[in-house]
Image (cartoon, rainbow, N blue to C red):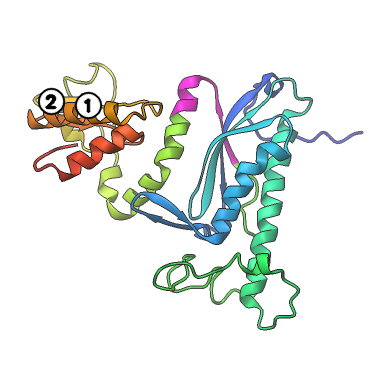
Amino acid sequence: MKQIKRYRRMHGWDYAKGASLFITVSTSPRRGLFGRIENGKAVLSPLGRIVDEALSAMPRLNSGFSLFGHVVMPDHVHFNCRLAPGLAEPLKTLGNAIRRFKNYTTKQARLAWQAEHSSAISTGLSEHSSAIYTKDSEDGQTVFGQNQTMFGQNQTAFGQLWQQGYHDHLCLNRRIIESTERYIAYNPMKWALMRDMPESLKIREPLASPRLDIGDYWKGVGNTALLAPEERLVSLRVSMKVKSDVAVAALVRRMESAADKGYVIISGFISKGERAVCEMLAKKQGARF
């Protein structure tokens, strides 16, 4: 009897008609090998840059697989991908794509580990491979950990780079896809908040406010005082396509006028226009955002 390979994905979904997925792959154990977070942005280590390049190359190396958004964090990666409709074995296509990604990055990490633990030039490593591990921070300290070498001072064997398998979330509609895209964009900032301002991510429940629909159970994170009825809020969302300096300047003036009147500016501050408003508000005395 032929053995049937079973995949632990969403039961009942026909992946042959196409699928959008949000994927997470983590290091084993959760070692921060790929860089650090500074000012809410990822600063990648040499190995982290290789992982980033390997993610970008996945569509080119895997037919029927497309990528639309990814982020490399210190100890894990997130990416959104799409399996084309009509694939004979869509889950095998997904599994093979992740396997190739893991195999390549593991090989590069193993070469870096060998370079770190070798005391002789005769290891056979190429100049490119040896350069994967470098001390590239301004103070000369390695970016891979606190007072440690890339893989840990006491590690005598390479072990595994990645945890076994991967976590996937099937995105069933455009709303979920957009939500995961925002999650990817905000992930470095969330990491920084969890480290520096954990109180800002504390879940508060139940929430009650005239701003919330009566009869539903609400919970949330962040500055829940903004739900007070006397607060005046302005929601700011600017398309990434708006790049004109004139349009951005006009937007900044409107938001500055709103801040002068006591409005609180609510935004993700991701696009060029939103970031310009954020910079203005950060310099403006008494502005709340």
Whether residue 243 appears in magenta in the rendering, the answer is: no
Quadrant where the N terminus sits is: top right
Q: Is residue 208 visible?
A: no
Q: Is residue 197 above or below residue 252?
A: below
- Residue 232's label in the rendered image is 2
Residue in the image at 59% along x and 73% along y:
155
In the shown orientation, is residue 284 left or right of residue 200? Answer: left
Where residue 138 appears, as percent x and y from the top left, is 40, 69
- Pick whichever, 221 or 135, lies toward us: 135
Q: Is residue 4 visible?
A: yes
- Pick whichever, 283 or 165, lies toward us: 283
What crowding class fits label 2: few (fewer than 14 Cα within 10 Å), some (14-19), or many (20 or more)? some
- The part of the image, by quadrant, that contains residue 251 is top left
Q: Are marks 2 and 1 in contact (CB under 8 Å)?
A: no
- The part of the image, by quadrant, that contains residue 7 is top right
Where residue 11 appears, as percent x and y from the top left, is 64, 26
- Pick whichever, 228 or 232, lies toward us: 232
What crowding class fits label 1: few (fewer than 14 Cα within 10 Å), some (14-19), or many (20 or more)? few
Q: Name the amino acid type tagged 2.
A: Arg
In the shown orientation, is residue 282 left or right of residue 6? Answer: left
Secondary element under disc 2, as helix, strand or loop, is: loop
Residue in the image at 43% along x and 51% along y:
42
Residues shaded magenta: 167-178
Q: Of the residues tagged 2 and 1, which is closer to the observer?
A: 1
Residue in the image at 58% along x and 36% along y:
168
Where residue 256 appears, as percent x and y from the top left, is 15, 32
Secondary element under disc 1, as helix, strand or loop, is: helix
Choose the circle earlier in sequence order: 2 or 1: 2
Residue denoted by label 1: 250
